[in-house]
Image (spheres, rainbow, N blue to C red):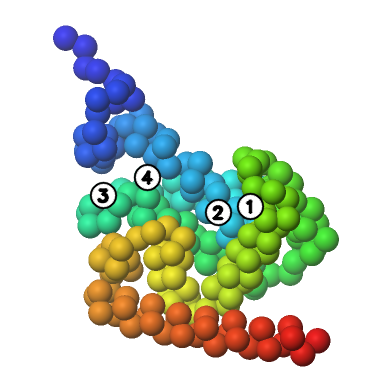
Amino acid sequence: MAIPSPVKAGFAEDQLLCQARNGSAEAFCALLEPLQGRLLHQAIALSHNLSGAEDLVQQTLIEAWRSLGRFNGQCRLSTWLYAILLHRHQKAVRAAASRPLPLSQLPADQARSRSHSLSRLPASDEPPDAAARRAEQLRRIRHLVMALPPAPRQVVLLRFFEGASLAEIAAVMGSSVGTVKSRLHYALEKLRRMNLAELRRDTSL
């Protein structure tokens, strides 16, 4: 009797996960296929560059495959993947800061790359002015979040951009729920202060 392919309907996530842990690349691809579009959008939001985002997703999937045995199910698979994505992004940022900026990464080119990446996203049904206001609001929020120290920043991104629970965040960060709560409180208070400072600066111009 032929063994059914793991990509066929009826195979639950835990079955695919079990097969992937046993070395099935087909099961691993089937497991992650529904998450790759969302992962790419998250990577674009972090890197503002379609090419860089695609590289980031590729690195994330490679690391996920190599470390799948360490996934213990204490959080959703999407949350675990997002945590890897954040780690890879932070590592890339640190590496980029230690080397000269190539011509292809000059600010004007980054702006063109960002426009190109945004043009690849699905069109919104929002009126243009409402979409522009929402995009500016999201840009401002992300700017403030990315200015946070690494640990509180990761908590905020996991909590509000991935929708992870406090227990899930504690699991992926290897800390207690109490520590996560403390970092979240610190981050929200710092974001409040930074936002007030920006508003004061804007109104003084």
Residue drawn at point x = 66 percent, y = 84 percent:
198
**Label 1 amino acid?**
Gly
Q: Is residue 25 left or right of residue 114?
A: left
CB atoms of marks 2 and 1 within 8 Å: yes
Q: Amino acid at mark 3?
A: Gly
Which disc number belongs to residue 65?
4
**Which mark's residue is nearer the viewer, 2 or 1?**
2
Q: Can the viewer see residue 25?
A: no
Residue 42 position within the rendered picture, expressed as x and y whole percent measured from the top left? 53, 53
For disc 2, the neighbor class at 10 Å (few under 14, some 14 to 19, many from 20) is many
- Which residue is situated farthest in the left direction here? 1
* Residue toward you, 20 or 43: 43
- The residue at the point 29 percent across, 68 percent down is 166
At label 4, the amino acid type is Trp
Residue linked to disc 2: 43
Return the residue nearer the eye: 89 or 25.
89
Q: Which residue is mark 1?
A: 52
* Residue 175 drawn above or below residue 61: below
The earlier-in-sequence mark between 2 and 4 is 2
Dot 3 corresponds to which residue?
69
Q: Residue at x 83, y 61 (%)?
A: 108
Left or right: residue 191 versus residue 19 is right
Q: Which secondary structure lies at badge 1?
A: helix
